[in-house]
Amino acid sequence: AQRVTQPEKLLSVFKGAPVELKCNYSYSGSPELFWYVQYSRQRLQLLLRHISRESIKGFTADLNKGETSFHLKKPFAQEEDSAMYYCALVPFSGSARQLTFGSGTQLTVLP
Amino acid sequence: EPEVTQTPSHQVTQMGQEVILRCVPISNHLYFYWYRQILGQKVEFLVSFYNNEISEKSEIFDDQFSVERPDGSNFTLKIRSTKLEDSAMYFCASSRPGQGKNSPLHFGNGTRLTVT
């Protein structure tokens, strides 16, 4: 069974500082990894997925299969980045589209 | 941009009562899901639904739960006899084919269910 671990429940950084939200996963097969974000009082929304290799709102995430990690990074945090961030995994070859979520990291960017 | 909509935003019910949570997925989506999040805990998968039947369900999704797509637009989650531990935020999500096997999920705003 797959599992996603986000070791930090809370993370605070100052505006302009780099930020890294950690995500580790365990899955025996080939996974697809996502980051979802939930701003205050808003819905969960997709931030980025590893197969797209995009940078969204300045965030990037690289899948490291050796370390089974998919850390989310941004070089210069902004106050509007304050939100709850969830790392999620789905088996790449699975027929079910069941996302397994990590427990989330609440990011607060301080002025 | 089209959105998944959920009603009501907050539902309070007494233990033992039946509740129906409603969702309108994005219109060209074909895969539908329910997730829940108990306060302070992670978002958990309940059930996925495709082609008018359940594709997969978790251990949480026991006989108390059922899903239905009664018409072309609504997707409902019914809890037959609510328990205190059913209190949670329930999220509906949908996705469409054509973006690869694991097309991203679009979530609704959630329904907060409080069982007293």
Image (cartoon, coloured by chain):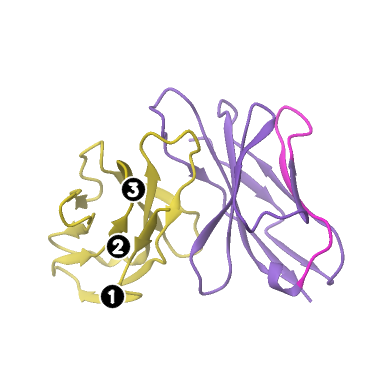
Chain colours: A yellow, B purple
| Residues behind callouts 2 and 1 on a single chain | yes
Identity, as a three-letter code, of the amino acid under mark 2:
Asp
Label located before the other in sequence (2 or 1)? 1
Q: Is residue A54 magenta?
A: no
- Secondary element under disc 2, as helix, strand or loop, is helix
Residue drawn at (43%, 57%) of the image: A101
- Secondary element under disc 1, as helix, strand or loop, is strand
Q: Considering only vertical position in the picture, is A31 above or below B62?
A: above
Identity, as a three-letter code, of the amino acid under mark 1:
Leu
Label 1 Cα neighbours within 10 Å, binned few <14 / some 14-19 / many ≥20? some
Separation (CA) of disc 1 from disc 3:
19 Å
Residue drawn at (60%, 28%) of the image: B27
Label 2: chain letter: A
Circles 1 and 3: CB distance less than 8 Å? Answer: no
Identity, as a three-letter code, of the amino acid under mark 3:
Phe
Main SS, magenta region, reads loop
Judged left or right of residue B104, residue A27 is left
Residue drawn at (37%, 65%) of the image: A83
Mark 3, residue position: A34
Mark 1, residue position: A11
Of badges 3 and 2, the one in the foreground is 3
Label located before the other in sequence (3 or 2)? 3
Comparing A102 with A76, the one in front is: A102
Picture disc at residue A45? none
Judged left or right of residue B88, residue B29 is left
